[in-house]
Amino acid sequence: MHRMLTKYPIWGGLLLLALFILPLLLSPYGLSLLTQVLIFGLFAMSLDLLMGYTGLVSFNHATYFGVGAYTVAILAGLGLNNFWLSLVLGISIPVLLALLLGLLVLRSSGPYFLMITLAFGQMIFALAWRWRTITGGDDGLAGIPRPDLGLPMSMWKAQNFYYLVLVFFAFACLILWKFIHSRLGKAIVGVRESETRMQALGHNTWGLKYLSYIVAGGFAGLAGVFYVYFNGFISPQELNWTMSGQVILMVIIGGAGTLFGPVVGAGMIIILQNLISSHTERWPISMGIIFILCVMYLRDGVVGSALKLRKKGRGNL
Amino acid sequence: MELSEIVIQTLNGISYGLLLFLLAAGLSLIFGLMGIINLAHGSYYTLGAYVGLVIIQMTGNFFVGLMGAAVVLALLGIVMERFFFRKLYKRELDQVLLTFGFAYLFMDINKWIWGGVPRSLPKPTFLEGSISILGEAFPIYRFGIIVIGLGIAVLLWLFLEKTRTGVIIRAGVDDKEMVSGLGINIKLYFSGIFALGAFLAAIGGVIGGPIIGAYPGLDFEILVLALAVVVVGGLGTLKGAFWGSLLIGFAETFGKAIFPDFAMFTIYVTMALILIFKPSGLLGKEES
């Protein structure tokens, strides 16, 4: 186990190197896909912190993603295009929301937790739908410009924007990795395994879950910030349960509790979505079927299964 | 608010609440017996409304549509339990995720077949028109909903209290292992409870159809209301579902009358208050 843990970052490093070189080889379409994979990979990693490591399956993770995105879009509508301001607010407003909602949803556990996360997620969705003056209602907000960092390179150029996303993606990976393997992170995994045991050991389990919930919300917000810069447009659909479902599927298909697995999951879903959408309008049906099949037959996910196989192989030696 | 308006809104609240009860009862019983929250329950409701509409258009009879939709959805419930949920026996979280996948599937199938335009179901002719209450018009159809809703609540109560099957279901809610230990094939009852839940949801979809209609997005709108009911009332008991439904029905209708633009917030405020003061719901079993 220990050897696997220390080797894992090496693979991560190789992957990052590949992500650095790939844009030089890809077509504009491929680069656009890869940018989306990074953004959704970040989003999925933040959910994995909750689903895989804390054992909290949250059905409204799109709320934090969407609120981060709306924050940037609303600032842009006010003529405030400073990247750093948008970034800071795009993370801190979802964090504030997580601070508040976390107090409510974490009062409950198990089935109540999932019902309440879903219900409050749909509340924020309905709010975005109705509050036209701020959110543009179902028309959404359009024309969000790419960020201006004050550097001599334009973020309208796809490659430059990709590298900007990659830098933040790599930082997020590092921070999440460190967090999960810190003493706090290990305590959080302990809560997943047995909350009562961790309580008996003197841990404040509620506080640990709350912390994890807030960190996950912040990183989802960060993903939302880059999503809206990439897309130039945001609508209430990005806050809807369908978006939360999509990111849950990314975590499942990649493997919950593997951190980088969900990035692979995001890649698979984004590529499948583009392939299928170019042939038929019925992507949601396809996604529903993939969802059902994954839950039934691929519950450990692609990366999770691979890690299990390796572990098994070692055990036989 | 004037007295006449209070009376009208109270009646609206009761009829809306009883409509929600049809959903919440199934949701709560499925949870009680199987330990899963069925996130496709709003999809049963919506699908029921569409199927009911098709049958009413074919036969011209509202009640044939009502029973037809209920039977079709009950069969769907059995198929889902038998071929999907049973394969994930005792993996409750995975089963919930499965219901989420099905919700996705049904959402798009509905859109595919019936498009994005809102549909409305016709009322049975003898329930058309309205009567005057304290000088205000009140649609007779809403009385129809109250009568059907109360009738089903009573039947359901009699079924659970007075029949052998009902006793086994209640025992299963309390202690599944013990029921299995008595030599009862509890898995058979899982299919049954799924069928019953889908049956009731479809009835809700059809009788709610003339008022609410059927449109894309209805599935989760109504699901969230049903979830609010079981959060407020407590999971696993019929009593909780009943009183929770009435409370949420009132919160919704009075909320709409008082703050027309942000009606749904009265529901969330109700939910938040319950969560703060009684996290397992008003009549729910304490979480162990």
Image (cartoon, helix red, strand yellow):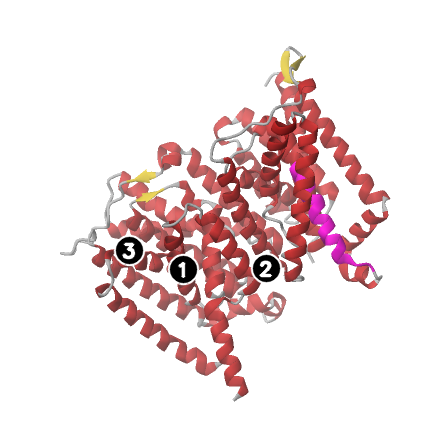
- Residue B273 shows up from this direction: no
Between marks 3 and 1, how big is the CA–CA gap?
14 Å
For marks 3 and 1 on the same chain, the one whose residue lies earlier in the sequence: 3
Which SS class for mark 2?
Answer: helix
Specify the segment rendered in magenta: B184-202
The furthest residue to the top: B135
Q: Amino acid at mark 1?
A: Ala
Q: Amino acid at mark 3?
A: Ser
Q: Which residue occupies 34% across, 60% down?
A: A38
Q: Which residue occupies 60% across, 32% down?
A: B54
Judged by its main secondary structure, the magenta piece is helix
Task: Give residue A276's mark.
Answer: none
User: What's the chain of the residue with tag 2?
Assistant: B
Image-based side of B25 in relation to A178, left or right: right
- Identify residue for label 3: A32
- Identify residue for label 1: A266
Residue A12: % across, % down = 36, 72
Which SS class for mark 1?
Answer: helix
Which SS class for mark 3?
Answer: helix
User: What's the chain of the residue with tag 1?
Assistant: A
- Quadrant of the drawing holding the C terminus of chain B: bottom right
Residue A183: % across, % down = 47, 72
Query: Which image quadrant for residue A172?
Result: bottom left
Above-or-below relation of A76 to A286: above
- Identify residue for label 2: B94
Q: Residues within 10 Å of mark 2 (few under 14, many from 20)?
A: some
Between marks 1 and 2, how big is the CA–CA gap?
20 Å
Q: Is residue A32 magenta?
A: no
